[in-house]
Image: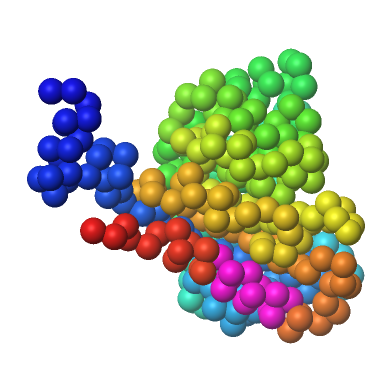
């Protein structure tokens, strides 16, 4: 029996070719980072994200708590108990934390120790992913691989995945980040995809790039980008990136995958002066992503 007659027989029997067989849809967790609210207190950020209809939150880096200073959401040397308390605080509001920043490049002199503490904080708080990024150049890439290999078992023991995202330079693409994670070769060290950074830093279309690394991707930092009429990052659906094409390669993985909105702002116009303006943009970003995901995951017609 040749291939054509095999497919005909399969279709006649009511089956579909293997490429079209049902696969489990990815469980996308549409989250908002507290980062867009950095000019306002953390409590206001969490309230705004909840009010904008999110079920998931990603912890940003710092917030102005009303004293004009940048106060860390969670200090790099904070005890795991402090992280646990912050996680409980989010859940009491009805928000499940899904991601936090490492706050340090892997190649930094204290990179291993800070990442280890961040993983322990995330484990204590029940935060499944720690986000990291940096610049690998020459020997630095070997440092990345060596440190991430040592961190893999720590992440596994804490039920955490370390995700590496694009940040220009030699790790400016998802393909380059995936080359690092494949060399590390640990299930708890994977890729976070930031399409906005790929288009911004390298002026490269992220769609072919994500196809080259989709198997390694475990989450997204959602930010769009415009090259015209002004070069700037912006919220999803307001830039030049096709989010249907972006998420299509990972729409049916059977995995749980956070989509964490890092930039929700509108291009060209000034950013809101009041938190209510940020709330409105957060809601718009959520609704846009919900529409995209719903469309991509419509069951195939029988």
Q: Is residue 249 magenta?
A: no
Q: Which residue is pictured at 37% across the width and 62% down the height?
A: 298
Colour scheme employed for the rendering of this structure: rainbow
Q: Is residue 279 magenta?
A: yes
Quarter placement of the C terminus: bottom left
Q: Does any portion of residue 245 appear in the rendered image?
A: yes
- Viewer-proximal residue, 16 or 279? 16
Q: Is residue 27 above or below residue 118?
A: below
- Viewer-proximal residue, 78 or 235? 235
Residue at the extreme left of the image, as rendered: 13
Q: Which residue is pictured at 74% across the width and 27% down the height?
A: 170
Q: Which residue is pictured at 44% across the width and 66% down the height?
A: 294
Q: Which residue is pictured at 66% across the width and 17% down the height?
A: 142
Q: Does any portion of residue 77 appear in the rendered image?
A: no
Q: Is residue 280 above or below residue 266?
A: below
- Viewer-proximal residue, 254 or 21? 21
Q: Is residue 27 above or below residue 219?
A: below
Please state the extent of the stretch shown in magenta in the rendering: 278-289
Q: Is residue 124 left or right of residue 133?
A: left
- Viewer-proximal residue, 123 or 279? 279
Q: Give x and y (percent) for residue 188.
A: 47, 36
Quarter placement of the N terminus: top left
Q: Give x and y (percent) for residue 136.
A: 74, 26
Q: Is residue 195 left or right of residue 275?
A: left
- Please tell me in which quadrant of the rendered image residue 102 appears: top right
Magenta-drawn stretch, dominant element (helix, strand or loop): helix
Q: Is residue 136 above or below residue 46?
A: above
Q: Is residue 204 left or right of residue 188?
A: right
Give the number of callouts.
Answer: 0
Q: Give x and y (percent) for residue 61.
A: 72, 57
């Amino acid at each position: 029996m040749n291939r054509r007659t095999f497919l005909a027989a399969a279709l006649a029997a009511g089956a579909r070719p293997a490429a079209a067989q049902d696969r489990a849809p990815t469980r996308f967790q549409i989250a908002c980072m507290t980062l867009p609210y950095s000019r306002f207190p953390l409590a206001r950020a969490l309230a705004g994200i909840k009010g904008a209809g999110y079920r998931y939150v990603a912890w940003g880096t710092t917030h102005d708590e009303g004293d004009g200073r940048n106060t860390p959401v969670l200090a790099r040397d904070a005890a795991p108990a402090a992280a646990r308390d912050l996680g409980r605080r989010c859940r009491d509001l009805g928000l499940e934390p899904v991601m936090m920043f490492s706050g340090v490049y892997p190649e930094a002199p204290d990179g291993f120790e800070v990442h280890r503490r961040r993983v322990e904080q995330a484990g204590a708080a029940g935060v499944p992913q720690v986000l990291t990024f940096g610049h690998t150049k020459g020997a630095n890439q070997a440092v990345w691989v060596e440190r991430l290999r040592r961190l893999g078992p720590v992440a596994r023991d804490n039920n955490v995945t370390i995700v590496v995202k694009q940040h220009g330079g030699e790790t400016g693409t998802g393909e380059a980040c995936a080359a690092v994670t494949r060399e590390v070769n640990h299930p708890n060290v994977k890729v976070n995809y930031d399409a906005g950074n790929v288009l911004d830093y390298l002026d490269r279309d992220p769609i072919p790039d994500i196809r080259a690394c989709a198997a390694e991707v475990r989450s997204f930092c959602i930010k769009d980008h415009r090259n015209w009429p002004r070069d700037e990052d912006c919220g999803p659906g307001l830039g030049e990136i096709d989010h249907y094409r972006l998420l299509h390669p990972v729409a049916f993985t059977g995995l749980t995958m956070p989509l964490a909105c890092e930039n929700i702002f509108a291009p060209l116009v000034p950013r809101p002066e009041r938190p209510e303006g940020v709330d409105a943009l957060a809601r718009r970003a959520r609704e846009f992503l919900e529409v995209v995901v719903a469309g991509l995951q419509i069951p195939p017609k029988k």
